[in-house]
Amino acid sequence: MSGYEFTRYLLSVTLLAMSPPKTILILWAVLLVGGVNAQTTLKEAFKDSFLIGAALNRSHFYESSAHEVEIIKRHFNSISPENVLKWESVHPRHGTYDFAAADRYVEFGEKNKMVIIGHTLVWHNQTPKEVFEDARGNPVDRETLLWRMREHIRTVVGRYKGRIKGWDVVNEALNEDGTLRRSKWLQIIGEDYIAKAFQFAREADPQAELYYNDYSLESEPKRKGALNLLKQLKSQGIPVSGVGLQGHNNWEFPTVKQQEETIKAFASLGLRVMITELDIDVLPIAAAPGADINIKLELKPGMNPYEKGLPEEIQQKLAKRYSDLFKIFLKYKDVIDRVTFWGVTDAGTWLNNYPVRGRTNHPLLFDRDGNKKPAFHAVIAVARDTNAKR
C-alpha cells in the first residue's frame, strides 16, 4: 500500500469510528472527491483526452508476470513493444523471419481490445550488421540496401496490415545538433533513406499511421533539425502522420516550457503528436539526457542512492514532476493522440541498467511490487481537475 493509499485508509477508519450519518457522508465525499474515486484507472481518467499506453516485454504478452499483466489490462488501452518488432528480433538473418513473439504481442493487444503500435522499422541500433554488408563483409551498394529495406518493411508491416494501427517508421535519425546521424543507412543510401522508408511502409499498409520517433526533441537544436526534416518530407508528399516525442526525462529536462514549445512546434506542421516512451530518471545524472543505448558507464559511489526504496520526499518530487508534465499534455490534448510509458513497473524499467548497469531506478507510476505510487495519484488528480473545469 502506498503512502497515499495508507493515509486514505487511516482517514476512512477514523471517520467510520465516529459513525454519525453526517460523518459517513463526509467519508464518501473524501473517497469520491472530484468524481474520480480510488479505483479510477489511467485509461478511464484520460478517456476523453488521449490513449494511455505501456511498452511491453515478453513476460507481459506471454503472461508470465501475472501482477504486471493485470496492471496492463486494467490501466492501459494502447501497447508498444519494447523489442520484439525490432529488426534483430523479427528478422535476425537474411531470408529468416521469426514472428513467434511478435504474433503473441499483437494477439495480446487484440484479445484485450487495445490500440497496437509497431516499433520500429528503420533504426541504426538493433539491426544485424549483415544488413549493411555483402557475403565478404564489405558495404553493400545503395540499390541492395534499398531492396533489403523494402523487403523487410513490406514483410513485417504487411503481416500485420490492418492490425497494427501505427508504426515508428524511422527511429532516432538525428544527432543532438539536429544534423542527420551518420548511420549506415545514411552512408550507403543517402539522405533520402528516410523518405524511402515511409514510402515503403505506406505501400505495405495504406491505412497505417506512420511516425518519426526520437529522443531529446525538446532540445532546441535537435527540435529545429527535426522540424526541418519533417517539413521537407511533407513538402515532398511523404506520408508522415505524426511525431513521437520519446519522453526519456529527468528532474531538469525538459522544462515545462520546453515541453510545451515542442508540442506546439510539431503540431504547427499539421502533425499528430505522441509521447512514446515516457519515464523520469530519478537517479543522479550519469550522462547527457537522451536514450543513446550505446552509452555504458561504470557504477561509482553515490550513483545508486535509492537501492532500498524511494524516500517520501523524492516520491513527492516525482509526483509533482509527472503532474507538471501531464498538465501540459492535457492542455494540448487536441493534438496529442497517445501518452505511452516505457515500461509497466519500476522492476522492469530499462533505466535500472542505463546508462549504468545495476542501479535501482524508480521512474514509473507503479513500484516494484505493482503498487500505485504518489505519482500515479498525482496524474489522476490532473485528469480530475481538468475534467472538473470543463
Image (spheres, rainbow, N blue to C red):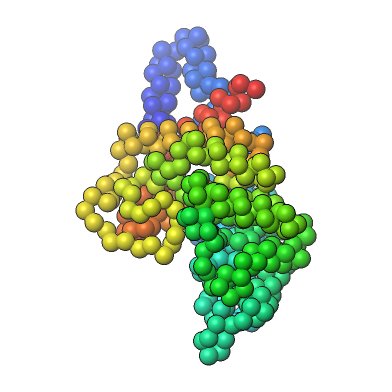
Q: Which residue is drawn at 65% across and 42% down?
A: 267
Residue 369 visible in image? no
Which quadrant holds the N terminus?
top left
Q: Is residue 267 above or below residue 130?
A: above
Q: Where is residue 167 in the image (x, y as percent from the top left)?
A: 65, 58
Q: Which residue is drawn at 73% across and 58% down?
A: 236
Q: Is residue 255 above or below residue 207?
A: above
Q: Residue at x 67, y 45 (%)?
A: 269
Q: Where is residue 67 in the image (x, y as percent from the top left)?
A: 48, 50
Residue that protrudes farthest toward the left in the picture: 301
Q: Is residue 368 above or below residue 158?
A: above
Q: Where is residue 170 in the image (x, y as percent from the top left)?
A: 60, 61
* 114 vs 67, nearest the viewer: 114
Please give left or right for residue 55 compared with residue 359 in the image.
Answer: right
* 148 vs 265, nearest the viewer: 265
Which quadrant holds the C terminus?
top right
Q: Where is residue 240 in the image (x, y as percent from the top left)?
A: 69, 55
